[in-house]
Amino acid sequence: MSQSPKTGPAPLPDKKKKLFDGLSPWQKALAALPLALLLVGGAIGGALGALAAFTNVKIARTQLSAPLKAAAMLGVGLAAAVVLFVVAGLLSNALNG
């Protein structure tokens, strides 16, 4: 009971593009900065931080100048923090009456 050798092309290795590939170190730092909301806001902070991080990566890949990219990425992180604190306040108010 021998098996016949496999014929045909070999399967190609899976080359997934990583999220931060191609970004400079300062872009990686600013893109990952909103993930710190996970430490402050738990699951809600983590979700908002991840959404902001993905948005920052998209901004980093645009053709904007470096100062505009940095300002926009910091703005996204700040907006995510504001949204987190508004949602936390609303939840606290709703649960505590």
Image (cartoon, rainbow, N blue to C red):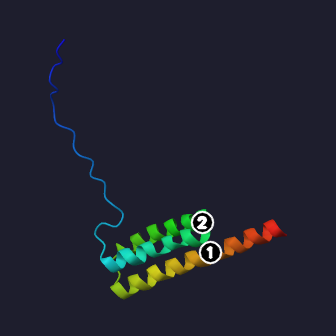
Q: Earlier in the sequence, mark 2 or mark 1?
A: 2
Instruction: Report x, y in % for residue 53.
Output: 46, 70
Q: Is 52 left or right of 57, judged from the image as shown?
A: right
Find residue 65 and report its image quarter.
Answer: bottom left
* Label 2 neighbour load within 10 Å: few <14, some 14-19, many 20+: few
Count of numbered marks: 2
Query: Outermost residue, right direction?
Result: 97
> Which residue position is annotated with label 1?
83
Which residue: 16% across, 15% down? 2
The answer to whether the residue labelled 2 contacts the one labelled 1, judged by CB atoms less than 8 Å apart, is no
Q: Quadrant of residue 83?
A: bottom right
**Nearer-the-camera pick, 96 or 74:** 96
Q: Quadrant of the C terminus?
A: bottom right
- Mark 1: secondary structure: helix
Decide which of 59, 30 is in the foreground and name it: 30
The picture places residue 67, in percent across and down from the top left corner, at 37, 88
Q: Quadrant of residue 58?
A: bottom left
User: SS of the residue at dot 2?
Assistant: helix
Give residue 42's mark: 2
In the picture as drawn, the residue positioned furthest to the bottom comes out as: 67
Q: Residue at x 19, y 11 (%)?
A: 1
- Position of residue 24 measured from the top left corner of the image (x, y, whole percent): 30, 76
Q: Residue at x 51, y 77 (%)?
A: 77
Question: Type of residue at label 1?
Answer: Val
Q: Which kind of residue does numbered mark 2 sit on? A: Gly
80 in relation to 50, above or below: below
Give me the residue at 50% from left, 77% from top: 76
Q: In whole angstroms, how far apart are the C-alphas of marks 2 and 1?
A: 14 Å
